[in-house]
Structure formats: C-alpha cells, structure tokens
Image (cartoon, coloured by chain):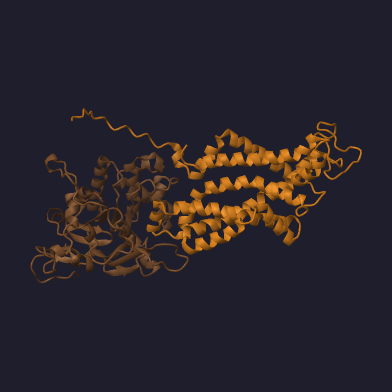
Amino acid sequence: MTLARPIVTATGLVKHFPLGNPFFGRSRSYIAAVDDCGFSLAAGETLGVVGESGCGKSTIARMIIHLVKPDRGSIELDGAPVGQSGGDVRRLRRAVQMVFQDSYASLNPRHTANEEVSFGLFALGRPRREAIARANEALHLVGLPPEHFSGRYPHELSGGQRQRVNIARALAIEPKVLILDEAVSALDKSVQAQVLNLLVELKRKLGLSYIFISHDLDVVRFVSDRVLVMYLGKVMEIGPVERIYSAPSHQYTKALIASRLSMDPSRRTAAPPITGDPPSPINPPPGCRFAARCAIAETLCRTKTPELTSTVGDPSHWAGCYATMPGSGHSKAPSAQPVVRPQ
Amino acid sequence: MSVQSTVVAPPQLAPMEKKHRRGYWVAVRRRLSRDPVAITCACILVVIVLAAILAPLIAPADPYKTSVARRLLPIGSSGHLLGTDELGRDMLSRLIYGGRVSLLMGLLPVVVATLVGGFLGVVAGFSGGRINMITMRIVDVFFAFPSVLLAVAMTGAMGPGLSNCLIALCIVFTPSITRIAESATTQIRNQGYIEAARASGAPAMRIITGHIVSNVMGPILTYASSQVSVGVVIASGLSFLGLGVSPPTADWGLMLSTLRQSLFVAPGNALLPGVMIMITSVSFNLLSDGLRTALDVKP
C-alpha cells in the first residue's frame, strides 16, 4: 500500500463532545469520541475500520465528510487540505459520499426511490430531467431496474433493496470514495452477502475507494485490503488485512480476533477473551486506553500513551502497544531496535 | 441438520403501478378524495364559506332590521325560517352574515400563525443549538399565560376592534405552532436521510423544502386545523367582553352571548350560533384528521 497515491489522508483528528448544557458556560467533562486519529486511504483501496460499539468509528466517518466538524486535525483530499471553507466542504462532499447503517431511517418515507436518489443532484443544481435520468442510471447500477423500482416508497422495499437505494444515492454524486458506516450490519446474512458482492463489483467497475466501517470482523476481512482497529476513540493498530487477522500485534486486536465465533466446534472458546465493558469515554485517564481490561498491562501502560509504531516484520503494519514495541520498557517487549515513527 | 430446499423461480415483478408515477401531492389528494368523512366535512365547510362570501346575495332578509313585534319567533316561523333573535332580526340572515366575521377570526390568525410559527419552528429545530434554545425560551414566555388571558390583555392594550383582535389571536396561536413545528423538526433532523442530504452537499434551504417541510406538515396541519375552532371561540369571547367586534355586528360568538338571556324563552334560537360554531369546528377537526391520514404515505 506504500506505492498507491493516498486519496484521503486524515491527520490527528480529535473530537470531544462536551457534556452538559452548551448554553451556560463550557463544561469541564467531555466524551473523547475520537482522540488523535490519523490514517490514509490509497486510491482503489478498501480500508476496514473495526471496533466495539461506541469506539468512535462513526464519528471518524462523519468527520471525514464534515457532518461533524473535527475539533482538531486535518483532512486532505488528493493531497490538498479540505474543510477550511464552505466551498472546500462542497468539494469534499462531491468526492466522498457515505452510506448509513439504518437503511430505513436513511430514506425519506415520503420520497420514492428516484426522488431520493435524484434529490442530491437536483439540489446541487443539475436540471431536473438530467437528475432523474442520472438517478435511474444509479438505480440500475445497484441492481434495481428503474422501471420497477424508481417509483417505490421505502416501505415498499425490502431491507436489502433499501440499502441498495442508499448506495445508489451515494453513487449518483459520482464520488471517488465511499464511506460505508455499518452499511450491511442490519441486513440478513444472505442479503448481506448480496450487498457485499455488489459493493465489491461496484468498486471494480467504478474504481472507487472504500472506508468500510463495521463491528463484524468476518465481513471486514472479506472486503478489506487494510484494517484499522479502534478502541475508545484511539487507533490501536493498522495494517494489511492478513497481518491483522493472522499476526495481530496489539493486545486488544488479539483479544478481538480471538473473540470471533468459529464455525468449527473444536475451536469454540469456552470463555470470551475480553471481559467486562469498555471503561467510560468521559475524561479518559492517560496511558493506553485498553490498559484497564488488558491482561498484561503494566505501570507504563497506565501512565504514558503509546504511540503507533511500525511492527517488527512489516513496515506497513503499525500498532500502539508497549508489549510488542521494541525497547518500550514493557516486560514482554522485544529488545530495542531502531524505532520508526509514522509519517 | 439438513434443510429441504426447493428452488423457486423468482416472482415476476409486478409492473410499476400507475400511482407511483404521480407526485406525492397528487397521491395525497387522491387518498383524501377517497375518505368519505373528509369529503363530507370539506363540502360542509365549502357551503359555509361560500354562504359567508355570498351573504348579500343569499341572505333572505336584512340582518340588521329590528322589529319589536317579531321578537324571538320560533324556528320554522313563516318568513323567518330559523326564527328571530331578541330584537326581531332574522336569525338565518344573521347566521349567514355572522360566518363572515367568525370565519375570518377563526381562519386568518391560524393561517398566519401556521406560516410564522411553522417557519420559526422549522428553522429553530433545524439549526438546533443556541438559535433553537433562544427561540424556544421566548416561546415558553408566551406559554406562561393562558391563551384567553393573553388575547384579552393584548386586545385591551391595543384597543378594541376587529384588526387588533386578529393581531392578538395571531400572537396567541404562533407559540404553540412554533413548538409543534420545532419538536417535529428536531425529531427528524437527525434521521439518516437528512444527514445524507447534508452529505450530498445540498444547501440547508433545499433540505428544509425538500425533506423537512413534507414531513412536519402533517403534525402542523393537524394541530392548526384544530385551532380554528378555538379561534372562533376566543374571538367570540373577546366580542363578549367588548374587545372584539361590537353589537349590532352579526358574529356567531356575539350572537351566542346576546341570545344567552333568551335561553329559557327560546332555547332553539339561542343555541343556533353555538350549533354553527360546533359544525364548523367539528368539520375542521375531522377534515384535519383525514388530511393527516392522507399525508401518510402508508395506506
């Protein structure tokens, strides 16, 4: 992934949601939804984002298309920073589109499929006739023949069909990057497979790049080239999909991978590898976010936040864990080696 | 575990029904026209409104011509189909003329309040944050006063008369409609399709007209139409207190209050203005019910 030119680069994204009434002074407490997160997405690549509910996956997605304004950090599109001005945001939104999780709530109950898909085009100033034709093309592209489906209301469509309309709406804008925020999580397994295959096919046909957000590790493995693992608003690990699944470096990733249910009865685990709930993201303490649930956490892990570091053996595989960071001072850490810092 | 499965040919998709080709509002009108209750109410209202507009042409007698000899004639008297009032004026003519002021008092403030309150509420709900908070706290101030008291206080301050009465009623109705519009907008503003529309780069005004208005129209219209009857009643209350229209103007509310003294002498006559107010308000309520059902896409 080092050769391909990055199409989206996010650096040091931070989003803290203040708690309490915004009207009467600034609140001291905040929810650290996303804390200092960065990654880059290469053209034509699928970046999977995994993590438990509430770890900030959706907030990252919303920050990338500026539905949520980042507190700090920058987003670059094709090497040029975006999001500074209104025109910038419009440029960003033409290049990056998003498909939301709840396929029903994402469609206006009073709009037909065509009205829904053409709305964005029409609102962006395309003539009505052209917008409608383009919407029909997009519907055709996602496998909904417009002669049958363009006049249907959301309640006349199945879950998979609704999600296809959502995908068509995003594609109608002709984006380069599609953010799929739990786009298949609410669908039945069989429908999920159909939509996933459609996504893979569309990516090939249209030369798209995906940011694929999901809590379903198997789905992420199926579609992704690289995987980013998040926990409580922090990036724990990022690397090629085979490395993440076969040789995870971070303790959290290891636990997450081990918690997958297996089809093979002999590999069923008796007890879940992680116990308890994630700690509250309100005013998080310093140190590794996972330290409270980590089996091998040491004082170092609870006092100093680990930086993402290139792992031994693969320069494109980064993890923020002292236990595998050479020369970190953790008792399990390998011996010191020259440490490469991320770009 | 084995599951016996037979491959079934995918069902042939029904060709798109014709209704889908038409727009949303065409479908609403079609659904409304199939609702017998709504249609009946609409017809009644059309008759009442037309009668009020065409009053000089259809009223059988002069509504202001008094006659000491023909006071409180019962309903069905010759020459006076609905009898006469306490000053011998023809009741039917007065009811027809009375609709003019009463419908104006009932309808105009509600229409104005729906436009103003709907706009304020949708903007407040859509922008959220401080704009929302400031708007809604101002609205709360108005909610602190009972609506009748507010209308009385404002008309009293501005002086009696039809136009001041109308202004007071507009101000009385606006806060509650603002609140309805705001809560309906807040409810849908975080829905996926609004976010998706924002993500597509559509300007805020386009999102409001394209997505929000059609979705908040239902609750607003339903509430507003129920306020028409309240408007008629408050207006008659103001007239009764001498703050609205003054006698001898024909107005249902005013007629109700002047005929009050004759309730035991000619109960039928005294109740007639009340019956008119009731028919009008019930028709508006039922029509609004039908409208709400018709606005819903699902059958």
Q: Colour of chain B?
A: orange
Q: Position of residue A205 (x, y in %)?
A: 24, 52
**Residue at 44% across, 41% down:** B21
Closer-to-camera residue (B240/B120): B240
Closer-to-camera residue (A201/B262): B262
Q: Is residue B100 left or right of residue A236?
A: right
Closer-to-camera residue (B239/A133): B239
Q: Is residue B135 left or right of residue A79?
A: right
**Residue at 74% across, 52% down:** B238
Q: Position of residue A322 (x, y in %)?
A: 16, 65
Q: Residue furthest front?
A: A299
Q: Residue furthest right?
A: B69
For the N terminus of chain B, give its image quadrant.
Answer: top left
The brown-coloured chain is labelled A
Does residue B283 appear in the picture of this structure? yes
Closer-to-camera residue (B79/B216): B216
Does residue A137 appear in the picture of this structure? no
Q: Residue furthest bottom?
A: A338
Q: Is residue A63 left or right of residue B281?
A: left
In the displayed structure, A263 sits above or below A68; it is: above
Quadrant position of residue A234: bottom left
Q: Position of residue B112 (x, y in %)?
A: 63, 54
In the displayed structure, B225 sits above or below A72; it is: above
Q: Position of residue A82 (x, y in %)?
A: 33, 68
**Residue at 52% across, 40% down:** B294
Q: How many marks?
A: 0
